[in-house]
Amino acid sequence: MNKLRPSLLLLLCATIPVLVVSVVIGQYSLRQQRAAIDRDIGQRADFSATGLARALETQRQLLSIVSETPRLDPPLDRKAFRELAHRLEARLPIWEILHISDLQGNIMLSVPAPQDGVSHSMVNDVESYRRVIETRTAVVGSVVRGEREIPTFPIRVPVERDGAIASILTALIRPEEVTNILYANGLAKTWTAWIADGDGRLVAATGAAPSLVGGPLNAFVRETGSEESGIAGVKIAGGEEVRTSSASIAGSNWTVHVGMPLAEYQEIGRTGYRILMATIFLIVALIIAAAFLFQRELAARRRQELAVASGQRMEALGKLTGGVAHDFNNLLMIFQAGIEGVRRRKNDEQKLNLTLDMMSEGVSKGKAITHRLLSFSRRSNRDAETFFIQDKIGPLEQLMKQAATDQIIVDTELDQDMWPVTVDPQAFEVAIINMVTNAREAMAEGGAIHIRGCNVSSGFKEMKQLRGPCIAISISDNGPGISPADIHRVFEPFFTTKGSRASGLGLSQVYGFAQRSGGTVVVNSLQGQGTSFVIYLPKAADQVAPSSSATSVANALPRKVLVVDDTSSSLEASKMLLEVEGIIVATAPSGQEALTVLASDPNVELVLSDIMMPNMSGLELAVEIQSRYPNTSVILMTGYSDALEQGARTEFPVLSKPFTRADMLAAFAAAAAKRSSASVVRLHPG
């Protein structure tokens, strides 16, 4: 299954886009099919309007011909008019009533005559009557309800004699005759059509109740949807919904509406929609399957990568522990030889001093090694000081020359007006030495290293984390350069192009120092011409603090100190270092016992506590002492604190183990200054 999974994923990734494209094409086809149906509805409305206009025009022309017969010459002959009307009734059965009226609308003769024998005195549709007189042309009137409430609409023509209108001839037609015309023009039996006049009345409709004809149009139909491209959704009497299109009937103020049942309209695309929905469900199912397979594949790849990374970490750990073991074994050899020398030459003061100096140098080297190791995991900048880099480079020049060897020229040029920075001075020195060492290893046959420093106000595009002014320290060499394939990996831990003779940790430490200090480091290289590393550090917000005087340190010695440490040998070593200064020392192996001692001994002026202790840490103890005994100073000491290395802050001075007498006295001065001024003073071991 593990081998088959990538193939299935590939197949799904190829199939899903094809199905998606098919859905898009299918949806487009359905829209086109629906658009074609809507166009057909509009065309049928236009066709019906044309047929009705032709039929009405025919009726107007016939009535106009009748109006020219001599039988209508004044004075009217009732018998002649009736004979004419009966003859027309046989030939034109759609004419329900034929009557003639004067210019005032009084009906003079009507065939058939009213059933009650009394002629109607006035015409019903006065508006169309006026239009005939004004236009002197044939006019189609509105639907009205006349005798016996039967709805009819009039066609009126003027009867002109001697250039003047003598009377008006009117033929009344029942609306159902118009409905027959609609069907004769090809209207489908399942479709609905209706005609409305300009006054908003229903002229005729297929399937409409007789009582609705001649009444308001909204009693028969009401709109349910907005109009799009001439197509509207409506609901007719009886509840049926239709999609309708309308067209004006020429020669009248009528409008014909033709509608297709919505159910029939929807049924046309229903099969396509079923296929479309089935395809969409299939796509969703395939996507879920692909996501499941991808998750499984991703988990398998992650396990594989973790296995590879674990192997790489073990290899890197082996390199690191091997190098550290080598360095510490050298230091242990110094101490072993020193111990043997002290035991054998107790009375040889010169040899004893040389041995002690050698052991002191070993302590400094061991401290530098541990400081360098911790720099890879450190997230905080707790040992930072504010200083001028141009003041630090001078003392470093001899170390840089030693790191570069005699075959390489080291050229240093720093602007004297460079701004101060707030960084860890020891980490800065290690970073400079590491970059010089890296440049030296790149120039096996000798060369030159140029160190430059200046202020930079703005314009660093590649450094988003630097917003304000900063200083730049560049270290350039004229070595063979770095290949484009490797230049993006130079800051990776344990990455090296120098084989087993290099650890690959130097530039990683430089990168970690720059990031921890709020800056960054960039590299530029041209093969065959050399490499340049530039460290950017932000300008310090604080001023450079003045150095503490020897007098203030001497006056800061407490009379009695409580040492708290859970490691007995470290506890005794600290006690011995304090007693040499003439300080009375009390001890406690834990934080709880330290609180007990403080409760019983009011003479303790200062507490020197280790940070890493079980149950109650030194940080917790310091806060408790500050709460209970605000006049008692606290100094913390540690060889390593996970909390501090990950960025935890503390207002108490911190001594880094192993510390010297000078470090301890400086810490006492800082604690005394904090107690007297209630200001935070950070300790930075030298």
Image: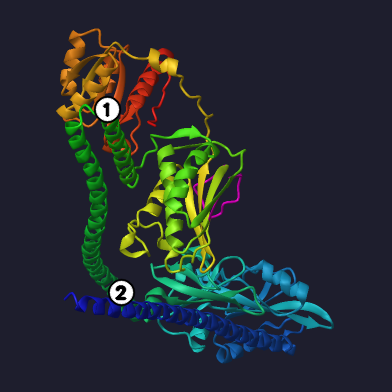
Drawn side of residue 657 relative to residue 180, left or right: left
- Tally of numbered tags: 2
Q: Nearer the viewer, residue 519 or 331?
A: 331
Please check the rendered image and state whether residue 96 is part of the magenta-colored stretch, yes or no.
no
Which residue is under mark 1?
A: 349
Question: Which of the 4 quarters of the picture holds residue 438?
Answer: bottom left
Task: Name the quadrant of the C terminus.
Answer: top left
Q: Position of residue 582 (x, y in %)?
A: 28, 13
Q: Residue at x 48, y 45 (%)?
A: 519
Q: Is 527 located above or below residue 560 in the figure? A: below
Q: Earlier in the sequence, mark 2 or mark 1?
A: 2
- Which numbered disc covers residue 283? 2
Measure the alpha-carbon separation of dots 2 and 1: 90 Å
Q: Residues within 10 Å of mark 1 (few under 14, many from 20)?
A: few
Please check the rendered image and state whether residue 450 is part of the magenta-colored stretch, yes or no.
yes
Drawn side of residue 350 relative to residue 252, left or right: left
Q: Position of residue 463 (x, y in %)?
A: 51, 51
Q: Residue at x 40, y 81 (%)?
A: 190
Q: Residues within 10 Å of mark 2 (few under 14, many from 20)?
A: many
Q: Residue at x 49, y 82 (%)?
A: 36
Q: Is 207 located above or below residue 403 in the figure? A: below
Q: Is 4 located above or below residue 512 in the figure? A: below
Magenta stretch bounds: 449-468
